[in-house]
Amino acid sequence: MPSPIAMPTHSNESAPAVFPPGAQVTVLLPLPVDSYDYRVPDDVTLAAGDVVEVPLGRRFEVGVVWGPGISDVPAGKLRDIVQRVDVPPLNEPLRQFIAWVANYTLQPMGAVLRMALNPARGWQSTNRVAVLVPSGRSWAEAGLKITPAREKLLLTAGADSFTTAAALARAAGVGAGSVRDLLAAGVLTTVAQTAPSMFAAPDPAHARPRLEKGQADAARTLANGVDAGFSVTLLDGVTGSGKTEVYLEAVAAAVVRGKQVLVLVPEIALTAQSLARFVGRFGVRPAEWHSDLPGKVRRATWHDVATGDAAVVVGARSALFLPFRDLGLIVVDEEHEAAFKQEDGVIYHARDMAIVRARLSQIPIVLASATPSLETVLNVRSGRFQRVHLPERYGAATMPSIGLIDMRAHPPEKGPWGRAWLAPPLVDAVTQTLAAGEQALLYLNRRGYAPVTICRTCGHRLHCPHCTAWLVEHKFTRRLMCHHCGYSTRMPETCPSCSATESFVPCGPGIERIAEEAAARWPEARICAVASDTLDRPSAVAALIDDILAHRIDLLVGTQILAKGHHFPQLTLVGVVDADLGLSGWDLRAAERTYQMLHQVAGRAGRAERPGRALLQTHDPTNPVMRALATGDSESFIAQEIEGRELLSMPPFGRLVALILSGPDEIAVSAVGKRLAAVAPVGEGLEVLGPAPAILAVLRGRHRHRLLFKTSRHIRPQPIVADWLARVRIPASVRVQIDVDPYSFM
C-alpha cells in the first residue's frame, strides 16, 4: 500500500437507522450521478442499507437507502419508493467502504456502488424457484378422498422443497399423476422461494495438511490473528515454500468461528490450482468470483455471499465489493501483482483497498508473495505490517539455480527453419531435460508470432487504425491484432504504402515464433504454446493444468500466465528468451516488476524432488536485476530500488495522481490540457508534469494527453485535485480520468 494512506476509522457496526412510513430518505443509485431523495411508502418501514426499487425519470432503478433525506424538495413533491427488493441489506462496513473508495479515487459514490450492487439488479426474476407446498386446503374442501398415498405426498411436500411434480412423486414413492390430482384440487400449490445455495459448507477438519515446523509456526501465527481485530501480515517465502497451505490454515480458523473469508487472486488463470487446493483441504469448492461467470451464477453467488451461505470466496479484484454478511479474513495472494490495479471505470488498487476494507471491518488481512512489492516491504520495516517468513521450500525440494546467458557471447545459431532466437546453451539444456523425461518451459512475455510486421520493400509497418500501436501477427489464426483495442484483420495481400506484393516480414519473436523454432528443434516433443488469448476461460486453464500434470505436454512455451502460482512437479527447466524485456521505457517500477516476474517464472522449476534450474537470455548481464537474480542477493537490489525512489521522491516516498485526458478531437484534448496547466496547483511539495501526449497517444480512436500531479508523502492530493478540476470548464467531448497512485504510464 502506498505509504502513508490515510486509514479510515473502523466501523463499530450498530443497528442501522430506521425510517418510518412517510419519512424522507436519500437513495444512492449505482450510477455516476448524485443521490436522490424519496419518500418511504405508507405501508413500509425501511432501514439504512436496504436495497430498494425507485422511479427514475420514466424507468425504474435499484438503489440503496443511504440515510435521511438531504434535499430541500417539499415532502409533497417527493416520489415514493416502489418497493424493498428481497435481498439482504448492505451492512455498515460495506457502505463505509464504498464511501471511502469513492473519496480516495475521486469517483462518484454511485459508480463505486455499481460494483457492489450490480448483481442484485433483476434478482427477483432470475433467482426464484417455484416450490410445491401444501396449500392448507382440507380434503373435504377439495372434495377428495383421503388415501395413504395422498397423505404421504402431503407430508413429503411439507418436509422438503420440490420444484417438479416428478421429483415430489419420486420422494414420496407414488405416481406423478397423484401430484397432479392434488394440484388440480388445490391441496398442493406452488410458491416462489429463494433458490437453494449452490455452496456446501467447507469442512475445516477434512484433510489437515502435514506441515513442516516452519509452516506450522507460520500457520499458527496467522490462525491466532483471526478474531484478534485488524492487522496486516505479510506472508512471504521462497517459491514453493507452501504459502498457500499456510494461509489455508488461517482460512480454516475463520470458518471454524463461523466467519466468511475472501481470497483475492490477481488473474483467473490462478484460480484453477487455487480451487483444486481448496477442494483438497476442505472437501468442497469455494465460491468463485470473476468476470467470466454467467449472469445467473453471479447473481446467485452474490446472494449467497450476502446471506452467509457462501463461506469462502476465491475471486479477482471485483470480489472485494461483494456484500459479505460476516467477513472475518481477507487473503491477497501474489500481493505484488500489477493485475490488482483496476485501470478502467473506477480506478483502484485491489490490494490497497482490501487493506482498507479489513480496517473498516476490524479483521486481519494476509498479503502473500514470494516477491513482495516495495511498498509492502517498507510498511513491514516501519512496523505498520507484521511479517511471517518461510525461508525454505517444502519437503525435499530445493531452490532452482539461476544462470545468465550472455547473448553477445552466445548468439543463436540459424537453422534450416530460418532465424533462431534460442541461444546454444539454452538449446542444450532443453535437449538434456527432454532426454531425461522431464518438462521444460520457454518463457517470453509477448503474445502472438511477431510484435511488428514490416514491408521489406519500403519499410512500412502495419499499425492499428484506432491506436498508436503496431499490429501483432498471430500466425496460428492468420490474423493481425491490436492488443490494446482488440482490432483484428487479415494480412493484406499488398503493402498499403508501396503496393508491393508478398513483401511482409515478421520482426522480433512472440511465443508462436518460439514454439515454431522449438517444433523444428525437438520434433518428437509435445509442445504447447500458452498465452492469455489461448486460455480465455477457467475451463481451458484447468484442462491445460491436467495435461501438464499428466505429462501429456513436454515443452511449454508461454507468457506470464504461466509464471506464477502454478505447481508442476515434473518441470525442471525454465528458459527465459528475452529477460531484458520490460526494462526499457519510462516506468518507475520497471526494474521491480522485471525482477518479480523473472523470480516467479524461475520458481516454476524444481518444485518437487528433482532439482531445477533457470537460464535467462540477456544482452546486459551486468544489469542490477540480472545480478540480483543470478546471485540471489535480493536485499541489495531492494536497497538500490529504495534509494532511487527516495532520491526522486517517487512512491512510496511521494504521491502521484495522473490525469488522463481523451477525446476524438486532439485539438480539444490539447486545449483542456493547457487550461489545466494554466491553473495548476503551486506550492511547497507540489509539482505538475505535462500536459503531454501519452505514450499510447491514440487508444480506441481517442487522442490521449496526460498530466502528472506529484506531492510529498505528507500531502493528501485528493482535495487539491478536486479543487483544481473544479476551476476548469471541461467540454463533454473530453473525458478526464483520474488515476490516484498510477501503475501504468502509457
Image (cartoon, rainbow, N blue to C red):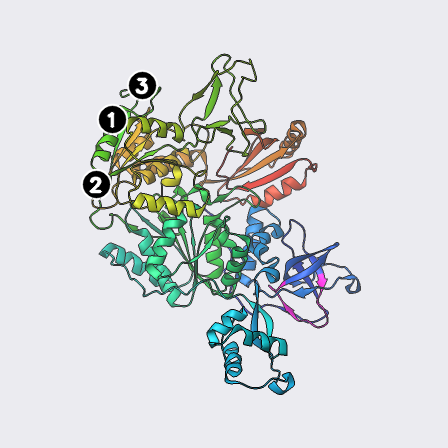
The tag on residue 611 is 2
Residue type at mark 2 is Pro
The residue carrying mark 1 is 425
In depth, the one of 309 and 637 nearer the eye is 309
Q: How many marks?
A: 3
Query: Mark 2 to mark 1: distance in Å?
Result: 18 Å
Which badge, 2 or 3, is on the more N-terminal residue?
A: 3
Could you say where residue 32 lies in the image, as x and y percent from the top left?
64, 49
Is 31 colored magenta in this rendering?
no
Q: Residue at x 67, y 50 (%)?
A: 33
Tag 3, which secondary structure? loop
Q: Residue at x 58, y 56 (%)?
A: 117
Residue type at mark 3 is Lys
Query: Mark 2 to mark 3: distance in Å?
Result: 31 Å
Q: Residues within 10 Å of mark 3 (few under 14, many from 20)?
A: few
Residue 214 visible? yes
Which badge, 3 or 1, is on the more N-terminal residue?
A: 3
Relative side of 420 to 112, left or right: left
Q: What is the magenta segment's predominant secondary structure?
A: loop
Choose mark 2 or mark 3, whichever is in front: 3
In depth, the one of 180 and 30 nearer the eye is 180
Q: Residues within 10 Å of mark 1 (few under 14, many from 20)?
A: some
In depth, the one of 654 and 427 nearer the eye is 427
Relative side of 298 to 538, left or right: right
Query: Mark 3 to mark 1: distance in Å?
Result: 14 Å
Relative side of 718 to 340, left or right: right
In depth, the one of 695 and 675 nearer the eye is 695
Q: Residues within 10 Å of mark 2 (few under 14, many from 20)?
A: some
Residue 639 visible? no
Q: Quadrant of residue 84?
A: bottom right
Read off the magenta span: 38-51
The residue carrying mark 3 is 414
